[in-house]
Image (cartoon, coloured by chain):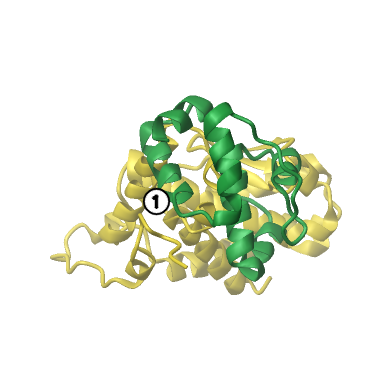
Chain colours: A green, B yellow
Amino acid sequence: MKAIIMERLNCSEKRAAVIEHDLKEITPALQPLLDRWLRDGHCEDATQYHGYSLNRLVSEMGMRFTGALLTLDWIIKEPEEALKALSEPIR
Amino acid sequence: MEHNLIFEGLEQNMDTPIPDFAGEGLEEFAPSMEVQAAEIREVFMDIPELQFENWKNLDVSERVDALQQLENEVAEIAHRPALGIELETLEPGVLGYCNGDKIVISDSLLGIDGMYREVLDTVFHEGRHAYQFHNLYGEQVEKNEVLVESWRDNFEKLGYESGDWAIFKDIGFLRYKNQPVEVDARAFANVVLSELNI
C-alpha cells in the first residue's frame, strides 16, 4: 500500500508510511472505497456522513483521496469533534 | 480514539520540566511562551495602527505594514529572524501558512473588518511556526529540548522538508490538527490573544 500511496500522491516514503498506518485503521464502511482506489485509482463517492462526502472534501477543500478518506473516517468515528474541526479555519 | 499513534505522549511533553542548565548562556534562549505573550502585549500596545479603532480605518496595504511591524517585534522577542508578511489568494477556509521563508495571509481575510481577531490569530500562529522552523533549521533558542524534538520528529515523519505545507490534503484533518507543531502554534496564539484580551 505504501508504494501506491507514494506513487499516487508523489510524497515521501515517510509520509506514505504514516498515511498507510492510518488507512489500515479506517472504519469498515470505507474499506470498499480504499480497496477500489488501491486497485484502480478511482476516488469518487457521494455517500454523505453528517453532511460530508468524499466528493465534497475533494472538491471543496482540495483534499486528495487519502486525506479525504481519513477525514471522512474521523467524521464517522467522532462526528462532534470532527465537525467542529472542519468548521474552523486552517492555518 | 488514538489520535497520535506515531507522536504518542508528545502532547504531555509540553509541560515537561526544562533541563537544569548551569546558568551560563541562558540569555541565548527565548523566553517562555507566557513571557513572550506579556512582551508581545507591550509592543502591541505601542503600535497604534493595530488598535481596532484605528485598524478599521486602514486600507489593506496599511494593514500589511502594521502586521509587518508586529511580526518584526514578535520575532525579536522570540529570538528569531523576522519573516516578510505577504498576501496570497488561498483556498476557502485556509487563512495562512508559513513555509519557513515567509508568512502568508489570505488576501480576503485582510479586507474584512470583522476578521480582526482572525488576522491576529493567524499572524501569531504562523509566527510560531516560524519559531519552530528557526529552532529546527536555524538555531535552537527554545529551552525545552523535548518540545523541539517533537517538532523535529513531526517535520521529518511527515515530510515537511519538501516545503509542502498543505499536508492536511494528504494526511486528513485529524492527524493534521493533532500534529505537535499545530498544537503548539494554536496554544501560543491563544496565550497571546488571551494576554491581549482579544
Residue drawn at the location 82% of the way across and 64% of the way down? B53
Quarter where residue B8 is shown: bottom left
Q: Position of residue A7 (x, y in %)?
A: 47, 25
- Which secondary structure, mark 1? loop
Residue B124 visible (yes or no): no
Q: Which residue is mark 1?
A: B79
User: Is B48 left, or right, of B158 in this rendering?
Assistant: right
Most extreme residue toward the left is B22
Residue A33 visible (yes or no): yes
Query: Which chain does the residue under circle 1 lie in?
Result: B
Of residues B187 and B10, the one nearer the viewer is B10
Q: Position of residue B29 (x, y in %)?
A: 31, 57
Residue kind at label 1, given as amino acid type = His
User: Is B122 left, or right, of B2 in this rendering?
Assistant: right
Residue drawn at the location 38% of the way across and 48% of the way down? B154
Residue drawn at the location 58% of the way across and 36% of the way down? A36
User: Is B131 left, or right, of B45 in this rendering?
Assistant: left
Quarter of the rendering occupied by the C terminus of chain B = bottom right
Of residues A28 and B156, the one nearer the viewer is A28
Q: Is residue B191 above or below residue B151?
A: below
Q: Position of residue A59 (x, y in %)?
A: 75, 38
